[in-house]
Image (cartoon, rainbow, N blue to C red):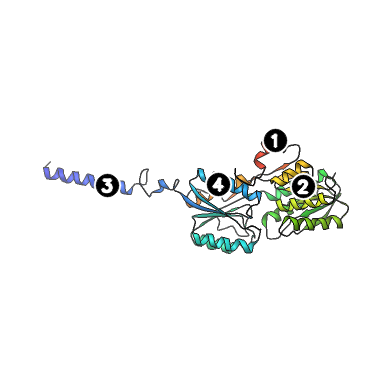
């Protein structure tokens, strides 16, 4: 072989090595698919209600998972469950262009179009707790089985009242998917108890004081009332306060949905007899994981269900129940 041919082959070999390195999709090549699993992503969590123990516990679970998943997490939320407050907040988040957001929609219909605008802007959308009438465009939806929780509440309340007497539902709200599912589960669960009279649902306004007033009116209107099922933290606290104020603590049996510090305290004091509790921390962690996976092009799970449990005075201090208890801060 001539010296000229040898030099040409050496140059060609060098070019081939360089081209292979540039076109490689294996490890070590910057900007390739190997980086997608570790790149930092920006995610915003929009709470259903800021300051509510359920959503604050969800935020704590999300923050803990974000630290593990290399996620830059921002948490926002309106102070009331009000779609007219949540939509402007969502619009401001869309304008900030995070890589993904996960949200507890305040209304299953009104939030569809604004969230479609988010996906149109290239933002991945994940739902937590509540859902939408149309979920075709969302990456994932994570929630408790609220219908099953409602049925569990019916069984617990029936047992407490000896399967007879009048019972009341507090907090059913059209357009709120969780409330609708819990109400349906409760009402259908009561059909198994023919000696229980269902006196209906109290549609409640925002605020514990207002809820307490409405429940007080129902206690006066139905002196034979023996049981109440309240659908969430504010409804539970308001109903508990009304029963206590009426001097009927322990006489009117109460089952609440959710297990915030106030509700757990009232359970231990005997004001409320049972709580159906969710796992908001796990929902928050799953929200981060699914949002980050969607951004990184990794597999996502379209629907994730988390379980709930019935807490009573007998099992509230059981270590196995600890994961179902809510908190007001992450410390």
Q: Nearer the viewer, mark 3 or mark 1?
A: 1
Front in this rendered view, residue 311 or 138: 311
Indicate which disc, 4 or 3, sits on the residue closer to the N terminus.
3
Please report whichever mark, 3 or 1, sits nearer to the chain's N-terminal start. Answer: 3
Residues under numbered marks 1 and 4 in contact, where contact means CB atoms less than 8 Å apart: no
Q: How many marks?
A: 4
Which structural element holds mark 2? strand
Label 2 with label 4: CB-CB less than 8 Å: no
Horizontal arrangement in the rendering, residue 174 relative to residue 252 (left or right): left
Q: Which mark is residue 18?
A: 3
Marks 4/3: CA–CA distance: 43 Å
Quick check: marks 3 and 2 in contact, CB under 8 Å?
no
- Residue 72: numbered disc: none
Disc 2 designates what residue? 255
The residue where tag 4 is placed is 63
Task: Identify the mark at residue 318; answer none if there is no mark.
Answer: 1
* Tag in front: 4 or 3: 4
Looking at this view, is 15 or 45 the one in front? 45
Asked if residue 82 shows in the view, the reply is yes
Residue 330 appears left or right of 8: right
Of discs 3 and 2, which sits in the foreground?
2
Residue at screen point 63% across, 64% down: 84
**Callout 4: SS:** helix
Separation of disc 3 and disc 2 at Cα? 70 Å
Q: Nearer the viewer, mark 2 or mark 4?
A: 4
Question: Toward the viewer: 277 or 206?
Answer: 206
Residue at the limit of the structure toward the top, as seen here = 319
Q: Residue at x 59, y 63 (%)?
A: 87
In the rendered image, which quarter is residue 281 located in? top right
- Residue 270 position, x and y percent, is 79, 42
């Amino acid at each position: 072989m001539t010296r000229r041919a040898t030099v040409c082959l050496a140059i060609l070999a060098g070019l081939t090595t360089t081209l292979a390195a540039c076109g490689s999709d294996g490890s070590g090549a910057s900007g390739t698919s190997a980086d997608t699993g570790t790149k930092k992503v920006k995610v915003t969590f929009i709470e259903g209600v800021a300051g509510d123990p359920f959503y604050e516990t969800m935020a704590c679970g999300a923050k803990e998972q974000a630290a593990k998943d290399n996620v830059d997490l921002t948490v926002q939320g309106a102070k009331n469950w009000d779609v007219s407050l949540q939509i402007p907040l969502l619009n401001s988040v869309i304008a900030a262009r995070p890589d993904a957001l996960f949200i507890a929609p305040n209304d299953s219909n009104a939030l569809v179009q604004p969230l479609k605008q988010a996906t149109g802007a290239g933002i991945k959308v994940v739902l937590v707790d509540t859902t939408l009438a149309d979920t075709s465009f969302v990456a994932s939806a994570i929630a408790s089985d609220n219908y099953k929780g409602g049925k569990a509440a019916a069984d617990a309340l029936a047992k407490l009242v000896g399967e007879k007497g009048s019972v009341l539902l507090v907090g059913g709200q059209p357009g709120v998917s969780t409330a609708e599912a819990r109400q349906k589960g409760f009402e259908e669960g009561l059909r198994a108890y023919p000696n229980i009279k269902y006196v209906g649902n109290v549609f409640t306004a925002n605020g514990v004081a207002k809820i307490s007033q409405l429940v007080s009116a129902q206690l006066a209107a139905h002196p034979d009332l023996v049981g109440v099922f309240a659908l969430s933290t504010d409804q539970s606290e308001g109903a508990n306060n009304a029963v206590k104020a009426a001097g009927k603590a322990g006489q009117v049996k109460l089952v609440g949905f959710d297990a915030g510090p106030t509700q757990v305290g009232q359970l231990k004091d005997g004001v409320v007899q049972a709580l159906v509790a969710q796992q908001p921390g796990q929902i928050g962690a799953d929200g981060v994981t699914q949002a980050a996976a969607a951004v990184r092009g990794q597999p996502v799970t379209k629907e994730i269900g988390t379980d709930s449990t019935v807490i009573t005075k007998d099992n509230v201090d059981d270590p196995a129940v600890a994961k179902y208890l809510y908190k007001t801060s992450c410390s």
